[in-house]
Image (cartoon, helix red, strand yellow):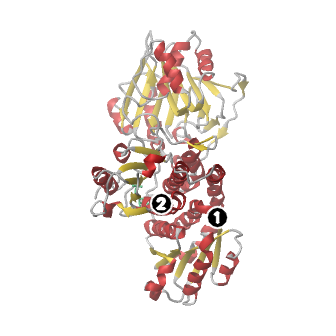
């Protein structure tokens, strides 16, 4: 997910572009750049780019003062193709500097297009798919900016939002939208557009939300909108009432709620590009049966929620692959004497890809011969660079310290890997493989349906608001869920919460259960429902105030009603992927309890988004 912006008008463009990029930095912040058509004749397109945050761009352009010109584009990047470096940063210039392009999305067919351009003698400065578009524009330029844009759009496949400058048309910008957001802003004596309304509301509240396939010709005194076939369209202007701060959070009160609500799309991004024609295709690597058979064990290592995602993923890998999976806290693994050699596959799970303990554990295990697969969200992060293979979770930037979409996309990728590996090992016949792929395809929708529990969790929150201690119980996959649910509640509401393998409670901790003790019983594992019920009865008999999370409509789950004060029905997912939807009500419950307690939800006390210290 990146942020792009374009401005053309009577004012200097650079300061406006920089401020808009700063407002969109939450969309991606590993590199940034601006391109401005300089005044004078012949006009030139001047470019400045930095790896790192927009602050570096302010510095390099002297807050925009060093970049005179009233027409320009800007970009803040969340890397997908190519490392987050300044040469990969956008905008990208065409060979002669005729065009500049900023892009949010992925060009699916950039490799063959690049080959054709290389054969024609074009040279490239970056690894990005976007630079191919800039060169294509130059290669197809016939003197008419709009016709050239239309021609290039007919050549490319993929998802994109473009901002395009042409040196020969110094006041005009083309904005193009397909599967990535782009919003036009109408001004007086100027017009602008951006990926997010956040970057517009300072200048205008009259906006036009572009639809897929549309493109717009933007000049200082007009915006002309066109359909994919080139036919002109009327401008459907909307008046934006959101404050800037609210717009940054997509209208939600906190980034955490925005990111909880983004989970269906995030899980979709994590899975769908890898489910091709009922085959699982990993990114840029594959493992043979010999590769996988060479591993005598798998160790999953991570910290915090990523560790709990690893615990939940363990069950799927063991069940499907028949390989023993040991899940180790990275801070423990790095100092342990667990035998590790080249027969060990280490799966390192990390949203940030920068967690010091996980990075250190990876280096330790690698030095002992382990092969490393990283499951991370941040492209080219330290852990990704250390790994032999990487599966990115594509969650997009996660701003709230308490992870939500980071966790569910980690789990989705672990499930994907489990099915892939089981198939490669020959443990799945074609029907079972296709069936599991079908179940993976259902996960985004299951997460979406779990989001409907938001109001119910808000109503439930008062029961936990003043608790001193909350116990989360669960068996097997539910115990991993219970741990994540307890951590969410602890880290944003500051209520002490403990998760227990439900069968373990009677070995001591049940001594703490008194009349009214709040217990969240996670009973979504269909196969163990009866056992989980017996644990609910144990705490109920001692007076606990039980809230049970059960699969909606599952036969036998109604018995829980006799012992639980409250029942939360979560989407009933058959098989081993159920946890990915069941975690959502736990996230929502923690959010609403923290809100009732007036806690700082996005930035809880004492916590950092990425723990890069030991
Ligand atoms: C989870 O809500 C916390 N923010 C924390 O436990 C986090 O999961 C942990 O620090 C690991 O971070 P990582 O995924 O970036 O490695």
Ligand 1 lies under 8 Å from the Cβ of mark 2:
no
Along the line of sight, which residue is nearer the eye, 609 or 412?
Answer: 412
- Where is residue 337 shown, x and y percent of the image? 27, 63
Q: Is residue 550 above or below residue 365?
A: below
In x, y percent, where is residue 179?
61, 36
Is residue 397 depicted above or below 505 in this figure?
above
Left or right, 155 with respect to 53, comes to right
The label number, if any, that marks residue 175 in the structure image: none
Disc 2 packing (10 Å; few <14; some 14–19; many ≥20)? many
Which residue corresponds to the image point at 48% horizontal and 70% vertical from the top-left?
486
Q: Which residue is mark 1?
A: 453
Q: CA distance from mark 2 to mark 1?
A: 21 Å
Depth check: 146 or 7 in front?
146
Quarter of the rendered structure image containing ligand 1? bottom left
The relative height of residue 346 versus residue 548 in the rendered view (above or below) is above
Residue 94: give x, y in percent of width and height.
46, 18
The secondary element bearing badge 2 is classed as: helix
- Nearest to the eye among marks 2 and 1: give it: 2
Residue drawn at (60%, 75%), measured in percent from left and top? 548
Mark 2 lies on residue: 309
């Amino acid at each position: 997910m990146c942020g792009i912006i374009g401005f053309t008008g009577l004012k200097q463009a650079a300061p406006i572009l920089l401020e808009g990029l700063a407002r969109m930095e939450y969309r991606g912040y590993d590199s940034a750049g601006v391109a401005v058509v300089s005044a004078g004749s012949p006009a030139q397109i001047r470019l400045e780019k930095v790896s790192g945050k927009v602050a570096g761009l302010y510095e390099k352009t002297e807050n925009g003062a060093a970049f005179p010109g009233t027409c320009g584009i800007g970009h803040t990047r969340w890397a997908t193709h190519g490392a987050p470096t300044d040469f990969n940063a956008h905008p990208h210039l065409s060979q002669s500097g005729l065009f500049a392009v900023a892009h949010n999305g992925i060009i699916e067919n950039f490799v063959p297009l690049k080959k054709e351009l290389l054969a024609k003698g074009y040279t490239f400065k970056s690894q990005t798919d976007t630079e191919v578009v800039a060169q294509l524009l130059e290669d197809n330029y016939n003197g008419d900016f709009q016709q050239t844009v239309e021609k290039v759009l007919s050549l490319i496949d993929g998802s994109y939002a473009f901002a395009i400058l042409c040196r020969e048309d110094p006041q005009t910008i083309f904005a193009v939208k397909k599967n990535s957001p782009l919003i036009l802003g109408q001004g007086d004596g100027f017009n602008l557009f951006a990926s997010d309304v956040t970057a517009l509301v300072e200048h205008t509240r009259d906006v036009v939300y572009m639809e897929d396939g549309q493109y717009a010709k933007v000049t200082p005194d007009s915006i002309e909108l066109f359909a994919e076939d080139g036919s002109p369209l009327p401008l459907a202007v909307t008046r934006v009432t959101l404050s800037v701060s609210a717009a940054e959070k997509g209208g939600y009160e906190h980034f955490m709620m925005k990111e909880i609500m983004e989970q269906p799309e995030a899980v979709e991004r994590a899975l769908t590009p890898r489910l091709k024609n009922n085959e699982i295709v990993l990114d840029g690597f594959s493992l043979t049966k010999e590769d996988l058979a060479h591993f005598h064990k798998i160790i999953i290592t991570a910290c915090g929620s990523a560790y709990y995602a690893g615990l939940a993923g363990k069950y799927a890998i063991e069940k499907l692959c028949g390989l023993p999976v040991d899940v180790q806290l990275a801070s423990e693994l790095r100092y342990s004497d667990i035998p590790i050699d080249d027969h060990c596959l280490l799966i390192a799970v990390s949203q940030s890809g920068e967690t010091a303990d996980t990075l250190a554990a990876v280096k330790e295990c690698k030095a002992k011969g382990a092969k490393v697969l990283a499951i991370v969200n941040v492209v080219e992060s330290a852990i990704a660079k250390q790994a032999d293979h990487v599966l990115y979770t594509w969650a997009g930037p996660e701003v709230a310290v308490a992870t939500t979409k980071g966790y569910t996309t980690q789990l989705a990728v672990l499930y994907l890997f489990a099915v892939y590996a089981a198939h490669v090992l020959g443990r799945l016949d074609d029907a079972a493989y296709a069936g599991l792929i079908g179940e993976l395809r259902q996960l985004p929708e299951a997460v979406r349906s779990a989001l409907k529990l938001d109001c119910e969790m808000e109503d439930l929150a008062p029961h936990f608001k003043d608790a001193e201690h909350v116990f989360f119980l669960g068996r097997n996959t539910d115990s991993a869920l219970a741990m994540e649910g307890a951590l969410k509640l602890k880290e944003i509401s500051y209520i002490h919460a403990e998760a227990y393998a439900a069968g373990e409670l009677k070995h001591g901790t049940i001594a703490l259960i008194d009349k009214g003790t709040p217990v969240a019983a996670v009973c979504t594992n269909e196969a163990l429902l009866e056992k989980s019920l017996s644990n609910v009865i144990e705490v109920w008999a001692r007076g606990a105030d039980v809230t049970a999370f059960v699969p909606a409509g599952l036969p036998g789950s109604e018995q829980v009603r006799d012992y639980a004060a409250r029942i939360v029905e979560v989407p009933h997912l058959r098989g081993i992927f159920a946890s990915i939807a069941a975690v959502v009500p736990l996230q929502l419950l923690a959010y609403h309890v923290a809100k009732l307690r007036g806690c700082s939800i996005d930035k809880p006390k004492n916590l950092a988004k990425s723990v890069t210290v030991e």
